[in-house]
Structures are given as C-alpha cells and as structure tokens.
Image: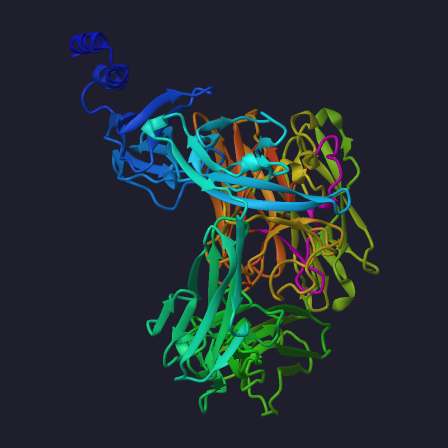
C-alpha cells in the first residue's frame, strides 16, 4: 500500500497540481497511523478543507490564512476530507466574520458544503469540525471572500453663497457617486470624454467624504463656470476581479439643474368616513431633470381600490383598513428627495371590556390561567397587557405583552404572578385619542408557608411553654384547619377563630410532656407543618479550641496530658447544671473511662477546664462531655484528641479559604456554566431576598463575614448550574481531605456537588460528593477524601432546584494532606444560625495554631 501512495505522490507532482498534491499528502499522513497499527485500531479524527466550484482565486494572506475568493451569484463548493477510525462525523459551521468566535445556530452535517448563487452576506469564516469520539475533534477553517460590484448611484447637491456683499454670487456643485463593492472600488470621473483629476484646475476638486455609507467619491465644481455645464460620468471598477466588469452612471449638468419641489392639495392629516371617495393631488413645483413622482402607503401596499395618475391619488369607497400614511415622493437625484405625507384616518374608534364573570380569575399554583378582554373596532387593534404595578414585569420578563385575540395565556402560574393586570388598546392607526383599557384581577392560590419549620424548645422542669406555628405566606391567607400531634398521637384542640397562626400551650415541661410536637396547618389549598422538639435537657457544651500547649509528663514513658476547655451553650435555658459526665476512650480500644466533674455555678460564656492526664503518645482519644441537670442527661458533645508531630502537619488555617477577600483565594467562575456564584455577607445581601432560604450570615455568625452562594430566583430555571473552580494544586501527597461548610435551606433546594478535575493530557472531571434537598437553616460541615493521580483542581457545582426557594451557600473551604476523619460524616458537624433554636458548635474559624504536640480534629 505504501509504495502505491509514493507512486501516486510522484505522479501528482508531475502534473503540477498543488491541490491534488495537498489532498494526496494529507491522505498519506492520515493513513500511516492506521496502516501501521493494524485493522480496527481506533484513530483520532483528522480533517483538511479543499475547494471546488467557481472560485476566482485561492490564496494565503499575510497571516498565513487560507482565503477563498468567489463572485457573488456563483456556486461555492467546499469539501472536508476526513480520516480516522471510526469514521468521523463532519459538521460545517460559519461565523459572521473573523472577529467573531460564536457559531451560528444552524450547521450542515455533511462532508461537502455547497451554496448555490452565493450572496455577499454569506461570506465569512467556515469551519469543518470532524469528531469520532477518539481524542480531540479536528477543526479546520477557510475564509470565503465574496466579490461584488453594484450599480453606482449619482446625486447632485448645490450651494450658493454671496461674495463681497451683494455684487455677485458663487454657485458650487457637488456630484456624489456612491457604490457598494468588494473589494473597494476605484472611481474615475469624466467630463464628456475627458478624465478629470484632483486639482487639475482651480475649479475641480475630487475627494472622499467622511462618515458615508458605502464607498463614495465627490466631484466638487467650485464657483461654477460656463464650461462646467456638461455631461459627467462616474465610472467604478474593481479591476476586473473575478471578471466583474466596470459600471458607470452619467448626469447632464445644466444651468437649470434644480432639486424637486412638491405641493399637496390636502392637509397633512385627513379624517374621512368609511365609504367616501377621496383624491389627493401632489403637484410638482420644480426640478430639473424632470422628477419622478411616486405614491406609497404605510403600512402595507397601496389599496386595491386606489388609482395613481401622475401626481394624483384617488381612493374609491374607502375602508377602515385603507387608513395609514400616504407618501408622495419626487426624485431626480438632485438635492434631497421631496416628500409630502398625508395621515389618512377613518373614523371607527375601538372599545374594550372584560367578559361577564371574568374580571377576577382564581387558579391554583402550577395550573394554567387565561385572562381575557374583548375589543371592538375596525380594524381590530392589538391588545397590550401589563401589570398595574409598573415595577413588576410580565411573566415573560418584559414589561408588556401584545396579543391579537385579547387573551393573555399564562402557563404554570406561580404565586408571584398574582395581582392586577391591565389590558389596553394599542395605537389606533394614528387617532389622537386615549387608549381604551380594562382591569383583570388574577388570584393564585398556593399552600401555606409556615414558621418555624423546626424549633428546638428547651425549658426548665415544671415551667410552661407556648408553641406557635405561624403562616407567613399563603393564598387564602387564613388557617382553615390546624392539627396538633404529640409523638405521633393526635391532640384534641378547641376550635378557634380563623387567623394566620395556631398555638399549643404545654402547661408543665416534664419527662412525660417532653418529645416531638407537630402542627399541620391547612388553608384549603395545601398543608404545611411546623415541628417542635420540647424537652428540659441541657444544651451541649461547646469545646474551646485555643487550648494552651499540652503538658508533657514522665517523658521517659511518653505520656502527655491535655487541658480540656469548654463553655456551656445557653445554660439558663433549663434547670441549673449540676455536673458533667466525662467519657474518655482510646480510639484503638472499646473500654471507656467515665468520671463526673461537679459544677458549682454555670454562667453563659464561663470557660471551664479539666486536665486529661496519662494520655499515651502517639495515641488518639475520643472525649465525650454530657451536662447533667435534675432532669437528667443533656446533649452530649464529642471531639477527637490526636497526637501528631507538628513537622508533619501545617496549621489548618494555612489552607482555609473563608472568601473574605475579593480575590476569593484564587477560585474562578466557570465560563461554561449557566450563571455565577455570588460573594456576599449580611451587610451586602439584598434586604428583599426570599425568606426561608439561604443563610443570614456566614459560618462565624458575624455580619461582616463573607460566604459564596447561588441565587435561585429569576432568571434562573430548573437545572441551571454555577461552578466555582479552585486554583491548580500540585501533587505532594497520596491522600488529601477537602473540608467545607455548606448551607442548604429552602423548599426548592437543588444539589451541591463536589468534583475533582485532574490535569493530564486533558482535563477529566470526577464527582466525589453530592447532596440534594433541604438540610435545614444551619451550616453543616463535610469532609471528602480524595486521592488525585496528578495535578488537580476542586470544583463546587451548585444546581438550581425546581423554584426560587433554593439558595445554596458554602464557606470555610480547607484542603489538607492526609486522611479525613475516620468516623463517617453525614454531615456530623452543624453550626446553627442566630435565632434558629438549633444547637451550635464552634466553627473552625475559632481554631488557633496547632499545639506543639497535638493536631485536634473536630469529628
């Protein structure tokens, strides 16, 4: 096979055909990899563009770009030669010009692109893209340059100025010749058979004016002389490019040359009755050469019941649809065209009304609604719909919508579409009357939105507590029914008047009355539920992480001690804390050592300490701390104490990104996604943001702290993605742990995905973690182990849910070497927001530097 190819190359060379040589050499280079590897071996796509058809010339320009020149009206044929196994698919696309990099919406799926009678607007860069799923697609391009020369247009303009008072006047004539062409045309001016040149005498000047459309040359005749009254020819040429012949136009300049002038026999606005006969006379008052008079109608063509004779226009038995603007135009290419316009109005004003029983439309959210207005009039004017609140756009996003049948159709209505809609007539063919209008009320009913979705209620033994489930939004905005349950058992509640909330009073908190209370509120459209967890248990303690260095004791036996420090969350919420139960367990063993730490008096913010002695190097320990009240054990807090040499682990704060700086630690927005992540804090967030979604503050709980989030409101739609990409990290360890906080609170939460992009011959994205749905109004932490084989980036991908209550936020992203905490995270660390009633743990932001001998991880 190969000797045959070499013979073919030699033969092509003897013929002297560069095109054939290029094709054969391309086929040879493309086939060699497949031939050498054997039949059935996959090979990436390769492509080469060749041309046929009626090309004028194919050349290489000054930047080594292939340019294919063709005359307008000829046939363009481009062929994309491809190789590869499997055989590649070919897709032709075109850009508007070399400055654009966006493909058009249409494409041609064929190896040969053929365009009959090519037009000038079809010039540009054509791309051949071949792909077969092996390697990267092959893309080749060629620029097509369409050549053309239109008929030139010659217009004449005159100016007259006084010289030296009023002794005499100077007349200057400008002959303007304009043509559209590609390539640029060359102009030649002639007076009779004589070719004129620039400044050949004091009376002739040839120049190119600024700010003209098309190519223009002006012949200026200064201080007109008797010999200047002659025949002038403007000849244009593209130098026989693509065999395009020269074109010319001639004008006879005389001492009577003058622009056209018109006189109209009727007023500019003419109001008539249907069935009348009217005649409008447009008389020529001057112009040399003889102007041509043309009548036209806007909008649309001239009526069939009309007749033009000279400058007279007659319309018999006029109809309403004959209304409009009638233009009388006189043109002789001297000066500007003369134009007179008559606005013809036929009396038949419109009326508009709302059908009986249709002034208020009530539908349920998610269903279809149709608003209707009836309009009468000839011709029947379009209806323009708008919201009465002018600051609120229509569902399409624009401020107005136009319909021709008077019906506004709304699909899958949402609660935001509720309100008053106005229908009004569009401009009625020039009538100077106020638009007719009517109003339609749209009520969208939707299930109630309640608060709180969940509340942890703590109270001392024997004291009462009142639980309230409040309807924040809903249509109708009244509680139709409310049902309370305690630990799943129905509670009997007395009937109450309709209002926007429901209450239940627990007279005395005890072991018997502690548990789960559920309130289901209905407004006859749907049901929503508030959940309360009532108990007298103490909240969990909160470990303090800025612990002093541990104290080494008995260095020979490698023992160490650790100062455990903590505060108590909301100690006054329940009965006084009597003591703490401390449980210490070496991770490698099951045995637990339990001790009790008595407490004299516990106050909010008071820092307690307890020394853990005889901890063995390098063992790790799980510490559990539980407050005890007269009610019994409260919520337990746990942590891991792990001994590690400081030389092996950098400070965890070294690689933590808290998004406090506008540079966001080198993270970048993905340009290929649908929208971007937003950086904000409590001070910069929109005060009108949607309630019951998104965090009020960052993980620190301070209004100044920043975090990143995705906004799910319009114009976002279901499935839209926002991707945040980290800088590129080099591999210096086998395993890494990605830790971050996330906040996923809202009825329509979509998904949060973590991907790892490994850089090799090409980037490969792998999803390593994903979470979907409402996770409550709290910050939670995730730890994700990864072991990338090469330089890598991490990508946070937020996916918009089914509606606008779906904001997702992230904060405090940490990348560290080594394994993640062994205990499964699902998630196992949460930070409640102020006022949420959910227990909170300190964020890693409170961590100080690592102790000299310890590296403490919160499990």
Q: Quadrant of residue 131?
A: top left
The answer, for residue 591, to whether it is visible in the render is no
Q: Quadrant of residue 851?
A: top right
Which quarter shows the N terminus? top left
Residue 334 is covered by the magenta coloring: no
Instruction: Examine the rendered structure and indicate whether residue 809 appears above or below residue 529.
Output: above
* 110 relative to 180 in the view: left or right: left
Rendering coords of residue 820 (x, y %): 56, 38
In the rendered picture of this protein, how many numbered marks are placed on residues?
A: 0
The colour mode here is rainbow
Residue name at image x 58 percent, y 85 percent: 478
Q: Quadrant of residue 89?
A: top left
Span of residues in magenta: 828-854
Q: Nearer the viewer, residue 800 or 855?
A: 800
Instruction: Examine the rendered structure and indicate whether residue 412 appears above or below residue 788.
Output: below
The answer, for residue 610, to whether it is visible in the render is yes
Rendering coords of residue 501 (x, y %): 62, 82
Q: Nearer the viewer, residue 847 or 475?
A: 475
Q: Nearer the viewer, residue 168 or 290?
A: 168
Rendering coords of residue 172 (x, y %): 62, 41
Q: Nearer the viewer, residue 17 or 711?
A: 17
* 255 relative to 56 in the view: left or right: right
Instruction: Examine the rendered structure and indicate whether residue 546 appears above or below residue 801.
Output: above
Rendering coords of residue 527 (x, y %): 50, 78
Instruction: Examine the rendered structure and indicate whether residue 852 appears above or below residue 600.
Output: above
Query: Please, what is the dominant secondary structure of the magenta stretch?
Result: loop
Residue 837 is covered by the magenta coloring: yes
């Amino acid at each position: 096979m190969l000797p045959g190819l070499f013979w073919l190359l030699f033969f092509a060379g003897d013929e002297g055909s560069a095109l054939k040589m290029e094709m054969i050499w391309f086929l040879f280079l493309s086939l060699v990899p497949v031939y050498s590897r054997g039949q059935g071996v996959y090979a990436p796509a390769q492509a080469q563009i060749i041309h046929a058809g009626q090309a004028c010339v194919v050349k290489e320009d000054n930047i080594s770009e292939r340019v294919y020149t063709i005359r307008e009206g000829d046939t363009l044929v481009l062929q994309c030669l491809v190789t590869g196994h499997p055989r590649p698919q070919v897709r032709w696309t075109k850009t508007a010009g070399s400055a654009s990099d966006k493909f058009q919406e249409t494409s041609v799926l064929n190896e040969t692109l053929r365009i009959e009678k090519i037009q000038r607007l079809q010039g540009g860069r054509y791309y051949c893209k071949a792909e077969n799923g092996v390697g990267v697609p092959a893309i080749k391009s060629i620029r097509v340059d369409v050549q053309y020369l239109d008929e030139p247009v010659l217009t004449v303009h005159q100016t007259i100025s006084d010289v030296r008072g009023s002794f005499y006047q100077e007349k200057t004539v400008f002959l303007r010749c304009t043509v559209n062409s590609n390539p640029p045309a060359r102009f030649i001016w002639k007076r009779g058979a004589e070719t004129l040149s620039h400044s050949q005498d004091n009376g002739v000047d040839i120049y190119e004016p600024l700010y003209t459309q098309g190519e223009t040359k002006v012949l200026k005749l200064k201080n007109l002389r008797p010999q200047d009254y002659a025949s002038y020819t403007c000849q244009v040429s593209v130098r026989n490019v693509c065999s395009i012949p020269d074109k010319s136009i001639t004008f006879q300049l005389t001492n009577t040359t003058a622009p056209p002038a018109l006189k109209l026999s009727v007023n500019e606005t003419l109001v008539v009755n249907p069935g009348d006969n009217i005649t409008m006379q447009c008389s020529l008052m001057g112009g040399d050469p003889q102007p041509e008079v043309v009548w036209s109608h806007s909008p649309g063509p001239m009526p069939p019941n009309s007749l033009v004779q000279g400058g007279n226009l007659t319309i018999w038995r006029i109809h309403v649809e004959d209304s409009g603007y009638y233009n009388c135009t006189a043109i002789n290419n001297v000066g500007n065209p003369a134009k007179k316009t008559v606005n013809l109005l036929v009396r038949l004003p419109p009326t508009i009304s709302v059908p009986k029983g249709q002034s208020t439309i009530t539908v349920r959210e998610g269903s279809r609604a149709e608003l209707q207005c009836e309009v009468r009039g000839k011709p029947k004017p379009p209806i323009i719909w708008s919201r009465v609140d002018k600051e609120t756009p229509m569902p399409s996003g624009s401020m107005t919508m136009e319909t021709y049948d008077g019906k506004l159709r709304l699909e899958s209505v949402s609660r935001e579409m509720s309100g008053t809609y106005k229908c009004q007539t569009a401009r009625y063919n020039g009538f100077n009357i106020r638009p007719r209008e009517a109003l339609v009320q749209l009520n969208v009913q939707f299930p109630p939105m309640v608060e709180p979705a969940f509340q942890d209620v703590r109270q001392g033994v024997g004291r009462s507590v009142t639980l309230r489930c409040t309807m924040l939004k809903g249509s109708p905005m009244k509680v139709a029914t409310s049902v309370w349950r305690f630990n799943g058992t129905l509670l009997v509640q007395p009937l109450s008047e309709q209002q926007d909330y429901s209450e239940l009073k627990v007279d005395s908190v005890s072991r018997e009355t502690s548990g789960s209370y559920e309130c289901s509120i209905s407004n006859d459209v749907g049901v929503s539920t508030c959940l309360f967890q009532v108990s007298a248990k103490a909240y969990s303690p909160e470990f303090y992480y800025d612990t002093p260095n541990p104290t080494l004791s008995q260095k020979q036996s490698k023992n160490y001690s650790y100062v455990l420090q903590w505060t108590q969350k909301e100690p006054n919420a329940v009965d006084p804390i009597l003591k703490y139960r401390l449980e210490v367990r070496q991770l490698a063993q099951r045995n637990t050592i339990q001790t009790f730490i008595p407490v004299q008096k516990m106050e909010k913010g008071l820092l307690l300490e307890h020394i853990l002695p005889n901890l063995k190097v390098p063992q790790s320990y799980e510490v559990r701390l539980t407050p005890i009240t007269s009610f019994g054990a409260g919520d337990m807090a746990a942590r891991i104490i792990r001994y590690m040499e400081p030389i092996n682990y950098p400070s965890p704060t070294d690689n933590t990104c808290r998004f406090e700086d506008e540079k966001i630690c080198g993270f970048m927005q993905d340009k290929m996604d649908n929208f971007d992540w937003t950086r904000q804090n409590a001070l910069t967030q929109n005060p009108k943001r949607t309630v019951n979604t998104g965090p009020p503050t960052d993980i620190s709980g301070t209004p100044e702290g920043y975090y990143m989030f995705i906004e799910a409101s319009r114009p976002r739609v279901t499935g839209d993605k926002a991707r945040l990409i980290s800088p590129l990290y080099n591999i210096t360890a086998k395993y890494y742990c990605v830790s971050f906080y996330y906040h996923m609170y809202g009825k329509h939460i979509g998904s949060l995905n973590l991907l790892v992009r490994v850089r090799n011959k090409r980037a490969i994205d792998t999803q390593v973690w994903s979470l979907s749905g409402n996770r409550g109004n709290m910050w939670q932490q995730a730890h994700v182990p990864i072991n990338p084989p090469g330089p890598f980036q991490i990508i946070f991908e937020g996916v918009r849910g089914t509606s606008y209550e779906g904001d997702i936020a992230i904060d405090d992203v940490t990348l560290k070497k080594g394994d993640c905490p062994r205990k499964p995270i699902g998630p196992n660390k949460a930070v409640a927001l102020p006022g949420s009633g959910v227990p909170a743990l300190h964020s890693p932001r409170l961590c100080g530097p690592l102790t000299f001998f310890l590296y403490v991880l919160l499990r």
